[in-house]
Amino acid sequence: MTHGWVFDVPAFANGPVTPVPLKGLGRFSHEAVAVDPRTGIVYETEDNAFPPGSGFYRFLPDQPGLLAAGGRLQMAAVEGEPGLEIFRGSAAGVAVGDTFGIVWIDIETVDPGDDGPESDRRAALFLEGFGRGGVPFDRLEGCWYGQGSIFFHDTRGGARREGHVWQYVPGPAEGHGGADDRGLLRLIYESPGPDVLDNPDNLTVSPRGGLVLCEDGSGVQFVRGLTPSGEIFDFAVNQLNDAEFAGACFSLDGGTLFVNIQGDTTGSPTDPGVRGGGMTLAIWGPWEKGAL
């Protein structure tokens, strides 16, 4: 773990930006962040397999919008059921639509330091939160704010370990403590197998409320769509190579969906099985005629 920090890069920058680690957001195997624009609270996913597991975190900034000014880091816990392994999904009796009350546990040690084995340092924050009742997941991935909620993936969640889609609905007084600080976590999809959804990674919320799910599985890679009613469908397929889709997002006007095929700046994207030649694709509607 050479660093394990979150960095803030201004979208309006037109030149190099000095990298400043936002240490208050914790040092662990970060995957994605999403900011609730109503509160400035930052939600974070951790990409660490079970065991020991991954946590779902939030950062309460002292000054919303100025993350370098510090704040409190917390890990989600299921109220009344410490350590509940909801990532097992239907294998543990957790069904799509099940909802859990979420409380938040303070993480005291946001930096485990550089001493000791890397595996211990990588898991240190999770183990602190888990030891105090935090809820474990199995490799949390994409995280996105939309429709007043935070949506995220557990890429190996479920009985088949093919993926979960979760929705977190913040409490009415999120970040201020008390009973109204408690949010709700709802399971909105569990993959029945890789032919339907194969280890979802990045995701985004469409302006119309649908979810765009980028796969990071094995073999042929898809972008899948998930409707607000829970219906899943194939949206796009990578016919160039076996590289994953990533970075899905809509333009500000909602008219263009951008998505990446992961790779590097060398190699040909048409070489079968070669994860080179990464690219960004732009996809136009008409969105109003579909679920996204």
Image (tube, rainbow, N blue to C red):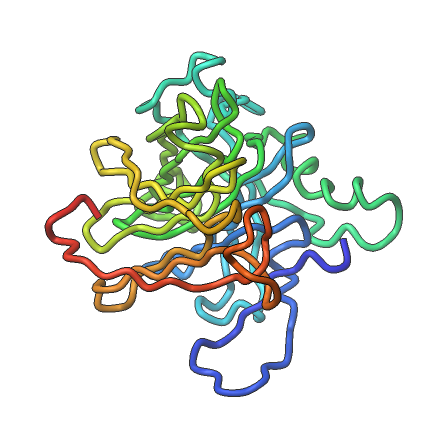
Q: Is residue 269 left or right of residue 249?
A: right
Residue at position x 26%, y 52% in the image: 206
Residue at figure coordinates x 23%, y 38% from the top left: 227
Q: Residue at x 44, y 66 (%)?
A: 64
Work out which residue is located at the far right of the displayed protein and give it.
116
Instruction: Please tell me whether residue 272 is drawn above or below residue 38 in the rendered image.
Output: above
**Residue 240: horizontal and vertical position, in percent?**
46, 51
Q: Is residue 168 above or below residue 145?
A: above
The front one of 105 and 255 is 255
Depth check, front residue: 274 or 62: 274
Query: In the drawing, does residue 49 fall left or right of residue 245?
Result: right
Q: Pinpoint residue 183: horizontal percent, then vertical percent.
A: 38, 38
Find residue 25 and report its horizontal and vertical position in percent.
59, 57
Q: Residue at x 15, y 46 (%)?
A: 290
Q: Position of residue 148 (x, y in %)?
A: 28, 49
Which sits in the foreground, 88 or 265?
265
